[in-house]
Image (cartoon, rainbow, N blue to C red):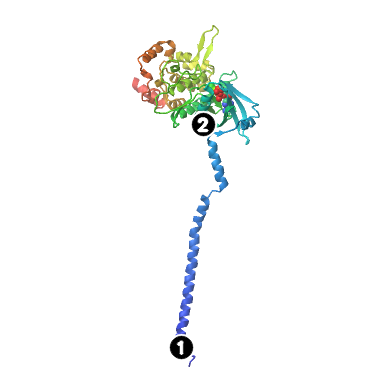
Amino acid sequence: MSSDFSPPTDNNSGVAAAVIVSSLVVVGKIAVIYLLCARKARKPIVKELQAREVDAPTMERFFQEIAKEKPVRFTAQQLCSFTANYSTTLGSGGFGVVYKGQFLNGVKIAVKVLNRSPDRQAGEQFMAEVGTIGRTYHMNLVRLYGFCHDQFMSALVYEYLENGSLDKYLFSEAREIEWEKLHHIAVGTAKGIAYLHEECVQRIIHYDIKPGNVLLDANFFPKVADFGLAKLCNRDNTHLTVSGYRGTPGYSAPEFLLKNHPITHKCDVYSFGMLLFEIVGRRRNAKIGSNESMDWFPKHVWEEYEKGDLAAMTVACGIEEKDREKAERMSMVALWCVQDSPDSRPLMSAVVKMLEGGVEVMPPPKPFHYLYSVGINVLQQANETGTSSSYATSKETNSIWYKETTPIMAKYEIQVASS
Ligand SMILES: Nc1ncnc2c1ncn2[C@@H]1O[C@H](COP(=O)(O)OP(=O)(O)O)[C@@H](O)[C@H]1O
Ligand SMILES: [Mg+2]
C-alpha cells in the first residue's frame, strides 16, 4: 500500500525537480542563444575597430611623408655627397651654379649653389626662394625639396627636370618640340603663374618670367622656376613698393622704367606676354638686323594684327596650317598681356581661359605707346600730379579681354547686329 501511496511531499518534490530541470534547460538554451547573438552582434564592432587601427610603422611612414612636403634642411656634407662633389653642372645664371645630383633613394635633384657676395643680394635671394616656392604646391611650379645654409654656403635643392629650360628649345634651329607641345607649355606656364597670383594665401609675384626660367620635365611638361626675385604680398595691397629695377631687360614691364610707379602682379603678365611672342616667333623678340637696326618681333606682330594679317605672319613663322588658329589666338593674348597700363592686362586666370580657347578673345588695343614716347608723357604727367591715373587698380572685369560666348554664337551675334 505504501508503494501505492507515495507521500505527497515525495510526489510533489519530483514534479518540482522536473520543473526546475526543464526550466534550467530553457534558461540554458536562452542563455546560449543570447550569447551567440551577442557574439554575432559584437563581431563587426571588433572588426571595425581593427580596421581603424593603423600599425605604428605605417603611421611613422605617414609622418615622414608629411614632413617631406616641407623643405628639409641639409648639411653641406650631404649636398657634397648628393652631387658627387659637384661633378655635373646643369646651368648657371646671375646668382650661382646649378648642379645635378641624386638622393640616396635614387630621386634626382638639382642643387643651386648661390654666390656669396658681400652685399645683401645673395641672402635676399635665398630667403626669397625658400619663403615663396617653399610654400607652394602646384604641378606647374618646380618643387623645392630643401636647402642648406651655413657660414660657408647657401644652396637650394629642387626636383630635377630632365629637359632643362625652355629657351634651349625655343631658340634652337632644330625645332625639336612640335607647336602643339609649345601651346601646352604656354598654358601650363600660365596656370603656374595664375596659382601664384590668385590661389596662394599670400600672393606671390615672380618678377622674372622668361623662357630661361620655365623648366621642362621628361615629357616637356612645364614648371615655373627661379624664384630668386619673387616676393610675397598681401592680396589686399593694390601694389608693392619695389626698390629699383627687377627682372630681365626685354621681359620686364614698362612701369619699372618709370619712377615711383606702382608695381603689381601685372608685371608678371607683361613678361608672360613677351614669352608668348617668343613662342609664336620661335625666336628672341629682339634681334639686331643687318643694318644695325633693331628687329623687334612684338611690334611686328602688332602691325600684322592691325593690318588683319596675323594668318600671314603665322605662315612666315613656319607654323603649320593645323596650328595657325591657336597661334593667332596666342598672338592676340600676347598683345593683351603687354598693354602699357597694368590694369588693361588680363589676370593670369583669364589668360589661361583665352589660351585654352573656350572663349572669344576680344580685339586688343594698341600696346607699346610708351615706346613711341606718346604714353611716356602721359605717365610722366601722372607722376607729377601724384596720381597714378589708369594705373590705379580698379575693379577687374573679364569682359574687356574675352567674351564667354562660343565663337559660333559670336558669329551669329555679328550677323544679327549687321542685319
Ligand atoms: N630643377 C632643375 N632641373 C634641371 N635644370 C635646372 C634646374 N634648375 C635650374 N636648372 C638649370 O640651371 C639654369 C639656371 O637656373 P635658375 O634657377 O634659373 O638660376 P639663375 O638664378 O642662376 O638664373 C636653368 O636655366 C636650367 O638650365
Ligand atoms: Mg634663371
Q: Amino acid at mark 2?
A: Gly
How far apart marks 1 and 2 lie (CA) works out to 100 Å
Residue ID for mark 2: 134
- In the displayed structure, 135 sits above or below 49; it is above
Residue 7: x and y in percent read 46, 88
- Of badges 1 and 2, the one in the foreground is 2
Q: In the current view of this chain or complex, which residue is farthest to the bottom?
A: 1
N-term-proximal mark, 1 vs 2:
1
Which quadrant is home to the C terminus?
top left
Q: Are marks 1 and 2 in contact (CB under 8 Å)?
A: no
The residue identified by callout 1 is 7
Residue 30, x across and y down, in percent: 47, 68
Which quadrant would residue 303 be assigned to in this image? top left
Camera-side residue of 261 and 78:
78
Q: Is residue 150 above or below residue 244?
A: below
Give the residue type at disc 1.
Answer: Pro
Quick one: 50 or 259, which is closer to the camera? 259
- Residue 8 appearing in the image: yes
Residue 351 position, x and y percent, is 45, 25
Circle 2 — which element? helix
